[in-house]
């Protein structure tokens, strides 16, 4: 099922995720008896002024450079008793023959029940992460327990042949739960954003892309809260930007423009 989306919404989605630039945080908990935040790995950055950014093109789908994008989001939780929760989704945007942007969405949610000890620790406390509000990108990992592995990853690349997540259906939302109702997985595209969440006896994992409005700027949030032992959890977000090839005429025009700009700057 394809949905026509207006360019501002697509530009917002691409711009928000482009803020990640390939961020990643991870935690391997051993002998952790209290919640703790894991510091993100160091990233390098360079300040760019508004005068430079104002001259850039291709900042989102529909620009002179970006012809479309594929957004993949996936969250998965594996419990030590064999239970598994998975939620994933793909938003694919492309330029059609009429030079208009079209979008297709695919979602999948599944839960597999397990047997025996879930590894959950009812006495452990991991909270507070949901109440943190950040404009831009946030990756939060809170762990209380032993031998846990949790990862928040967000990447962006330029790939004209991106890989779409398989197995989903052409629906804007999907959800699943086990028979006892204590393991749940869900994902939803809507209102210009994305929400994905997993709930298990040993904690929760979530990813949110929220568009900007009059009150606040847009945000991307990845959250892991693990209260138990031997849990394996991952939040993954990948944005593949597709670029339109430049014709020889466009290359010549760009070269002439650059030469004129250099000549003007040389006279100053």
Image (cartoon, rainbow, N blue to C red):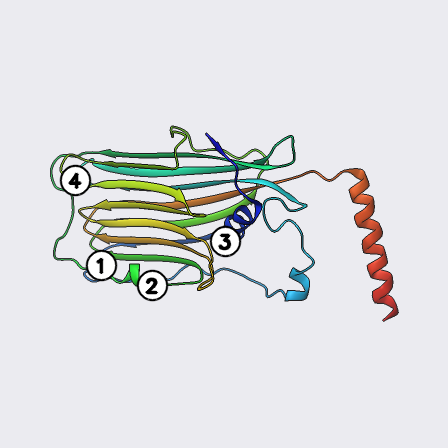
Compare residues 153 and 245 and report the one nearer the observer: 245
SS assignment at label 1? loop
Q: Position of residue 263 (x, y in %)?
A: 87, 62
Compare residues 32 and 53 and report the one nearer the observer: 53
Quadrant containing the C terminus is bottom right
SS assignment at label 3? helix
Occupied quadrant, residue 79: top left
Residue 132 disc label: 2
Q: Give the answer, above or below, for where 247 lies relative to 138.
A: above
Task: Report the mark closest to the observer, 3 or 1.
Answer: 3
- Residue 85 left/right relative to 41: left
Q: Residue at x 59, y 48 (%)?
A: 60
In terms of sequence position, does the residue under pointer 4 or pointer 2 come before the other?
Answer: 2
Compare residues 37 and 221 and report the one nearer the observer: 221
The residue where tag 1 is placed is 126
Q: Residues within 10 Å of mark 2 (few under 14, many from 20)?
A: few
SS assignment at label 2? loop
Distance from Cα at disc 1 to Cα at disc 4: 21 Å
In terms of sequence position, does the residue under pointer 3 or pointer 2 come before the other?
Answer: 3
């Amino acid at each position: 099922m394809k949905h026509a989306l207006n360019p501002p919404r697509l530009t917002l989605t691409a711009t928000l995720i482009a803020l990640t630039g390939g961020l990643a945080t991870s935690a391997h908990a051993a002998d952790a008896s209290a919640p703790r935040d894991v510091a993100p790995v160091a990233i390098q950055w360079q300040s760019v002024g508004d005068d430079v950014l104002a001259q850039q093109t291709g900042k989102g789908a529909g620009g002179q450079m970006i012809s479309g994008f594929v957004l993949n989001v996936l969250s998965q939780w594996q419990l030590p008793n064999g239970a598994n929760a998975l939620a994933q989704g793909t938003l694919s945007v492309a330029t059609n023959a009429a030079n208009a942007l079209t979008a297709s969405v695919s979602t999948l949610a599944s839960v597999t029940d397990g047997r025996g000890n879930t590894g959950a620790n009812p006495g452990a406390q991991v909270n507070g992460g949901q109440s943190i509000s950040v404009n831009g990108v946030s990756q939060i990992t809170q762990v209380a327990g032993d031998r846990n592995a949790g990862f928040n990853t967000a990447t962006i690349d330029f790939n004209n042949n991106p890989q779409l997540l398989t197995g989903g259906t052409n629906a804007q939302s999907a959800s699943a739960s086990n028979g006892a109702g204590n393991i749940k997985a869900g994902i939803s595209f809507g209102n210009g954003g994305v929400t994905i969440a997993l709930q298990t006896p040993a904690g929760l994992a979530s990813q949110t892309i929220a568009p900007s409005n009059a009150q606040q700027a847009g945000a991307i949030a990845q959250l892991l809260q693990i209260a138990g032992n031997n849990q394996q959890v991952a939040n993954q977000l990948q944005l593949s930007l597709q670029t339109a090839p430049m014709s020889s005429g466009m290359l010549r025009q760009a070269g002439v423009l650059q030469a004129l700009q250099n000549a003007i700057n040389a006279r100053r």
